[in-house]
Amino acid sequence: MKKIFILTSLVALCLLFACNSKKTASDVNLNKHWKFMKGDDLAWALPGFNDQKWDALLPDKPWEDQGIKDYDGFAWYRIKTVIPAELKESSYFKDSLRISLGKIDDCDQVFLNGELIGENGKTILGSKVPGNEFIKEKGFWYLDRRYVLPVTDPRIRWDKENVIAVRVYDQGGLGGMFASPFVIVMVDMQDYLGFDLTEDAFTFVGDTMMKKKFSIHNTSVKENLSGSLVIKVILNENGNTIFERKSDITIKKLSKLSDSIQFKADVSKPAKVLFSFIEKRSGKVIAAENGIPYILTPKITDLPKINGAKVFGVRPWSPFLFKIPATGKSPLIFKAEDLPKGLKIDSVTGIISGVTGRKGETMVHISVRNPLGIATRDLKILVGNMISLTPPLGWNSWNCWGLSVSDKKVRQSAENMMSSGLADHGWTYINIDDGWEDKHDKDGTILPNYKFPNMKGLCDYIHSRGLKIGIYSSPGTKTCGGYEGSYTFEEKDAAMYAGWGIDYLKYDWCSYGNIYPKPTLDQLKLPYQVMKRALRKVNRDIHFSLCQYGMGDVWKWGAEVDGNSWRTTGDIEDTWESLSGIGFIQDSCSPYARPGRWNDPDMLVVGYVGWGPSLHYTRLTPDEQYTHITLWSLLSAPMLIGCDLSQIDPFTFNLLANDEVLAIDQDPLGKQATRVRSHENYQIWVKELEDGSKAVGIFNLTAKPLNIIAELNDLNLKGYQIMRDVWRQKDLGIVQLNFEMNVQPHGAALLKLTKK
Ligand code: GAL
């Protein structure tokens, strides 16, 4: 799968429409009864072709996830279905039919009754000869496949059997049809009208008021649409309406109407806002809902407090850099006693730097003071072979800026990491993803492109703040974004990275698939071994982050190729399907996580994301975002914030600056949670912590609040336990045998249980 994810606002809008679409009884469901065959033959498009011997396959999961392992290239899907003429009556407009085929990895041609009707997400009206020439080099896996035909199109056979044949070309990785919906419907109001709730975040106005902007789009080319708009704010705990507004509105054709609501809300109580528009002539209802953010993290006080990792690893003679994350009213004064020889601390910034050569473990006594008090804590420094003893915390450019990343945006992010206060909670890395590379010059030196005029200067700047900097490349000739990779230049590239001062390398498989299209396990390891050797030759600690989407169960051998972390899945998106699909399958990798070796379920999708240059506010509800950070912390996952740091809203800050939650991710024992209960409606995960206590995540998988009972037996606990609500940082009392939690829809509770 090519992973270029450019989410234009148009696609975002289409997705919103899809979410809002209301199915009528007569929609033709295409979720089942697909037939599948590997290979390629245009005769398979023909309605009369006999596909009886083909295998059955579901359309909502890639073929690799349905037992068709390691297959790339051409394959076909076919389905037979009657399209009833009465379907036309289900729509107000009655003019067009839409065939929705989820998404397709990577490229597709779609045939209806032997005739080509669509290609890579674009409808083909009239005639085009199918042939072999369709664009199959470029990954189009992220596009919605929505093919729209006029009802008068002669290729549709009303009231008769129709054959839809989908020709797929997969370039590598997962392949085939996936996502949703799979359906034939009449184009209707929901195709033209839709709410956009992701233009911005909810804003807090003082302590009791909230404000939310929204807009409604009308993409019809011919109709102005009028009706009544109803907006309600409802409390989750009792369903009470705490705000209501009704108005009559008209949304002109091809335009959008923007407005905002302001209402009184208790920012600690879950609630949601429901928008509905009832179109006057058709009576059709278009609806959307948005969870209202509620804050669980207690306010930061003026008293000095030391946050972040309690253990730090460095190789002998590598440059040392560690900034003590601390909060409290400034100015703070930092002190570190018993530092290993060669290291010193800056008492104003809290940055420990220098070089130390003696292998071994040192307990450094740290203190942070201001006029209100003093905080102390021990930091274990381990000089040895291992680095990244706790999962990296930082930011990466991909999920917000995509290929539009630049020196300016990276510097700005570092500045925002500091000024937002996030760096004071342990967020350290500022990582450049794909899009910085130019080419190797005649001496084989990698040159950054025009957007990065001075890479060394950029690294120095980031280090001067006590932060660290990461970079990205591919073992292939090209990266996933089509930029220059490291193939055959590995040693020179690693030396260059070290020369600039790079601290983290994300090494992304991408076009290496062209070198070994069907890689064996050894071939999967090979490019990472080559880069491992190159990295070990330089005098710098560079976190080695493997990115190959989990191929060959990378968690079983990532450590062998010296990976400090390895992506376990494909790319994440800001949807519940993507988040839960990735997060809840991490159990099998759990035994392989340990200090310096982390499973990586991909970067965070909170705040303003968009895969650049245009951004939208995450489509995850507040509860889904609590689940995201809770689960990632339990998984001991590297956490790289994927949003625009200049627009951190109070809710996102509350998610990222809860020191007790982060301490679970950063726990020095380095164990990953395991799933101890998997029910269709909920899951319970448990992580062992260094102090002998256990962190417990209780996740509600349903769309309704749920009371969930956890048995101490399942958690492998006996006797009385002190239970702490980690998000609220509050003890809840003593429990024995079992306890019950009320968990929000798609939400999570994070608890810490300590023996009494
Ligand atoms: C993908 C990778 C993404 C991002 C992108 C850059 O393969 O999974 O996280 O790095 O490439 O092109």
Image (tube, rainbow, N blue to C red):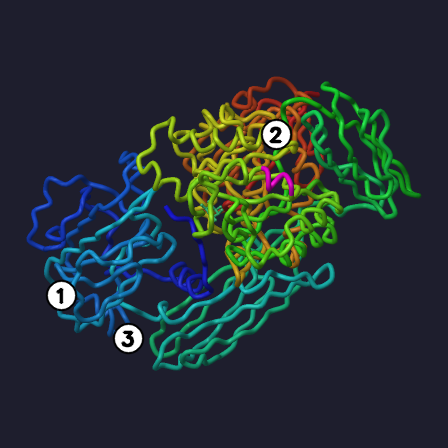
Q: Would residue 277 be seen by someone viewing this image from the given angle? A: yes
Residue 191 located left or right of residue 538:
left
715 shown above or below 285: above
> Residue at label 1?
158
Residue 337 located left or right of residue 283:
right
Residues at marks 3 and 1, CA–CA distance in whole angstroms:
17 Å
Residue at the image position 29 percent from the left and 48 percent from the top: 177
In terms of image quadrants, where is residue 267? bottom right
Residues at marks 2 and 3, CA–CA distance in whole angstroms:
54 Å
Residue density around tag 2, few if under 14, some if 14–19, many if 20 or more, within 10 Å: many
> Residue at label 2?
695
> Label 3 amino acid?
Phe
Mark 2 and ligand 1: say if the CB distance to the nearest ligand atom is below 8 Å.
Answer: no
342 shown above or below 626: above
> Label 2 amino acid?
Ala
Mark 1 and ligand 1: say if the CB distance to the nearest ligand atom is below 8 Å.
Answer: no
Residue 308's x, y, as percent? 72, 36
Look at the numbered disc 1 and give the secondary structure of its residue.
loop
Residue at the image position 39 percent from the left and 48 percent from the top: 2
Image: magenta residue range: 495-499
Image mark for residue 133: none
Look at the numbered disc 3 and give the secondary structure of its residue.
loop
Residue 496 is covered by the magenta coloring: yes
| Type of secondary structure dominating the magenta stretch | helix
Residue 300's x, y, as percent? 77, 46
> Label 1 amino acid?
Trp
Image mark for residue 93: 3
Residue 335's x, y, as percent? 87, 34
Please identify the quadrant where the C terminus is shown. Answer: top right
In terms of image quadrants, where is residue 679? top left
Q: Between disc 1 and disc 2, whose residue precedes?
A: 1
In front: 296, or 498? 498
